[in-house]
Amino acid sequence: MILDKEHLRANLDEVIWNIEEARISVSEHHIVQLVAVGKYTEVENIVTLYKLGQRAFGENQVQQLKARMAALEELPLEWHMIGRLQKNKINNLIDLRPSLMQSLDSLSLAEELNKKLDAKEAKMNCLLQINSAREETKSGVTPEEAQDIYLQIKESCPNITLKGVMTIGAHTDDTKLIQQSFETTQSIYEKLEKEGATVCSMGMSSDYALAIKCGSNLIRVGSALFR
Ligand SMILES: *Cc1c(COP(=O)(O)O)cnc(C)c1O
């Protein structure tokens, strides 16, 4: 459905207000980036949100990312890849040159990506995805191995610039469990700050305020903006 500008403005204002409230409760100096996730919405709504001031957008499929980057190439947008990357789509993603690939979910994917980046003489900014709630349906490395794998990628994949970590909160109504999954990721992030990590991506429409209070500095919000 194509949403009118005032409708989108109200949604965006509400999200920004909630971000402000949550981040100020952490610290006035705690800055949070909003990435608008357009995967369920029409490209027209992305244009409208851009006109309202939003610059960073995310997609979870390489094909859709490619189509939207092409459709909107006139606009100075920042694009994030946030979904599972199949190995046969790696070259397509490299050619798109996303600002940030948030869903690097295994060492073997990192090695494959690094090899293909090498062949194209390209680099890519990435986040290591952590399966902080240990859900079988979710990808990502386990919390226990996250730090080791992060360091290993840093050492053996020179074409990948690791910027930090990403997680999806526990899929449950139990706020305590969601909070736990964010705190798990946050404590890993804090250790990795010594290794230069600057991005802790956690929080979606249903849990971004909680994620920010747990230290997130990048949230990925779809339905709360485009409903
Ligand atoms: C879809 C998606 C989001 C946004 O989800 P909403 O609940 O619509 O805000 C965030 N992160 C990832 C990885 C997603 O796939």
Image (tube, grey):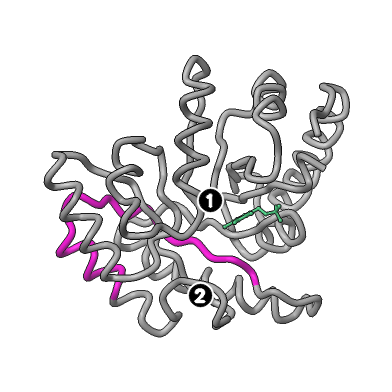
Q: Determine whether the beta carbon of the residue marked 1 sits less than 8 angstroms from the nearest atom of ligand 1.
A: yes
User: Which residue appears farthest toward the top when viewing the image?
Assistant: 74
For residue 168, side relative to residue 88 (left or right) = right
The span picked out in magenta is 149-169
Comparing 167 with 23, the one in front is: 167
Question: What's under tag 1, amino acid-wise?
Answer: Asn
The residue shown at (31%, 56%) is 88
Instruction: Locate residue 109: give its quadrant.
Output: bottom left
Q: Residue 40 carries which label?
A: none
Left or right: 78 in relation to 45: left
Q: Residue 223 or 26: which is nearer the viewer?
A: 223
> Where does residue 160 sit, x and y in percent of width and height?
25, 52
* Residue carrying label 1: 60
Residue at the spot 27% in from the left edge and 62% down from the top edge: 110
The residue under label 2 is which amino acid type? Asn
Q: Residue at x 38, y 61 (%)?
A: 104
Which disc is residue 131 wearing? Answer: 2
Q: Earlier in the sequence, mark 2 or mark 1?
A: 1
**Horizontally, is 108 left or right of 197 in the view?**
left
Q: How crowded is mark 2: few (under 14 residues within 10 Å), some or many (20 or more)?
A: many
Q: Which quarter of the figure is the C terminus placed in?
A: top right
Q: How crowded is mark 1: few (under 14 residues within 10 Å), some or many (20 or more)?
A: some
| Residue 173 versus residue 58 in the image, above or below | below
Proximity of marks 2 and 1: CB atoms separated by less than 8 Å: no
On screen, residue 152 above or below 215? below
Q: Distance between the residues labelled 2 and 1?
A: 17 Å
Quadrant housing residue 94: top left
Magenta stretch holds residue 156: yes
Ligand 1 is in which quadrant of the figure? bottom right
